[in-house]
Image (spheres, helix red, strand yellow):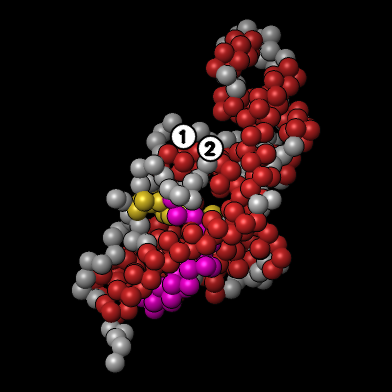
Amino acid sequence: MEVILSGMRPTGNLHLGNYFGALKNYISLQELYNCYFFIADYHLLTTHPNPEDLQQNVKTILCQYIACGLNPEKATIYVQSSVPEVAELYMYLNMLTYVGELQRVAAFKEKVRQNPNNVNAGLLTYPTLMAADILIHKATKVPVGKDQQQHLEMTRDFAERFNKMYKTDYFPLPVGFNFGDDLIKIPSLDGNGKMSKSYGEQATIYLTDEPSVLKKKIMRAKTDSGPTEKNQTKPQEIENLFTLMRSVSKPEVVQQFEDSYNDCTIRYGDMKKQLAEDMEIFIAPIREKIKEISANEEYLKKVVNLGSEKARESASKTIKEVREIIGFKNF
């Protein structure tokens, strides 16, 4: 069975974009593939997080993974730092990687531009750590966004370089997993691009938002003065509202507001109230499940231990074989 791997840095609560952009699809993938989903806490160290925040954020993402439908009995869900073999493979890959190619990575150059006072070695070698995450389980498919495509290409380069240097075909060359053209892309509430924490709290709908918070955010969403001609093209901020509505509302509700927009009778206040109600109906079960799981420390410990055991079984096999290929042998 093909291996699919995906990870997420523990930077806080997941939002609606995370759910529709990834988690909703992961739920179906775990039924068809050998899936590894991990919480990338090693990666977060490039930002020097507070230790207490790091631990809490790992727990938060773990709870939300499970509440959204990832099943620890079907997929391997683990914390990156609980698999030390990843760090060992990361070291081996760094020995095959050249400083020049790391300095040319677009994401690295952007990080340097954004924060020139924190250009650490971990940031520079981020692509090799990402490659170690993928190759440690010999993953064949990796769901990635456009911002991570270059890192995936580098993973393929590192795998191919290892195979060529040691005259083997040990590592497969992973490819990006495509969910299809009909993937829902959740927009920000402020009329900008896709939903992202970088646009601020008020522009982002979190899976833990309480009803009053949800309503307040949605009612503040950017709109215009309304259509002036029948069937006119929607401006981006209005199309964003309709995209959000299509993701959580019934088709007939969406059609009702489409019709009222096209005949210039739409009232954005009514649309936002409906959207807030439908969003609460959608998020409430997830939010309550998150609370339930978060309070069950024994269950979380069991999930973490199970995931770590399964991930280390795969990772230790890879490291043993990589050591032998490189030439590390016991006397």
Looking at marks 1 and 2 on the same chain, the residue that comes earlier in the sequence is marked by 2
Q: Residue at x 66, y 45 (%)?
A: 292
Between circles 1 and 2, the one closer to the viewer is 2
Residue sitting at the far front: 298
Question: Looking at the picture, how far across and down is residue 196, in whole percent?
Answer: 62, 45
Say if 239 sits above or below 161 in the image.
above
Magenta span contains residue 193 = no
- The amino acid sitting under disc 1 is Leu
Position of 197 relative to 259 (above/below): below
Q: Element under label 1? A: loop
Q: Please report the residue visible at 22 percent of the width from the left and 66 percent of the height from the top.
A: 169
Residue 258 visible to the viewer: no
Question: How many C-alpha atoms fall within 10 Å of the one at disc 1: few (<14), some, or many (≥20)?
Answer: few
Measured from the top left, where is residue 215 in percent x and y? Answer: 75, 30
Q: Amino acid at mark 2?
A: Phe
Quarter of the image for residue 325 reads bottom left
Query: Which residue is at the front of the view, 224 or 57?
Result: 57
Quadrant for residue 100, please give it: bottom left
The magenta stretch spans residue 85? yes
Residue at image position (57%, 35%) is 186
Q: Which mark is residue 20?
A: 2
| Along the viewing direction, whichever of 80 and 317 lies nearer the viewer | 317
Q: Point out residue 295 in the picture as x, y percentages from the top left corner.
A: 69, 50
Magenta residues?
A: 75-96
Q: Dot 2: within a 10 Å radius of its alpha carbon, few (fewer than 14), some, or many (20 or more) residues?
A: some
Q: Residue at x 60, y 47 (%)?
A: 64
Identify the secondary structure beneath mark 2.
helix
Mark 1 in CB contact with mark 2 (< 8 angstroms): yes
Q: Check the image and report above or below for 102 versus 304.
A: below
Q: Quadrant of residue 259?
A: top right
Residue 183, which numbered label? 1
Q: Please give the count of numbered marks on the rendered protein.
A: 2
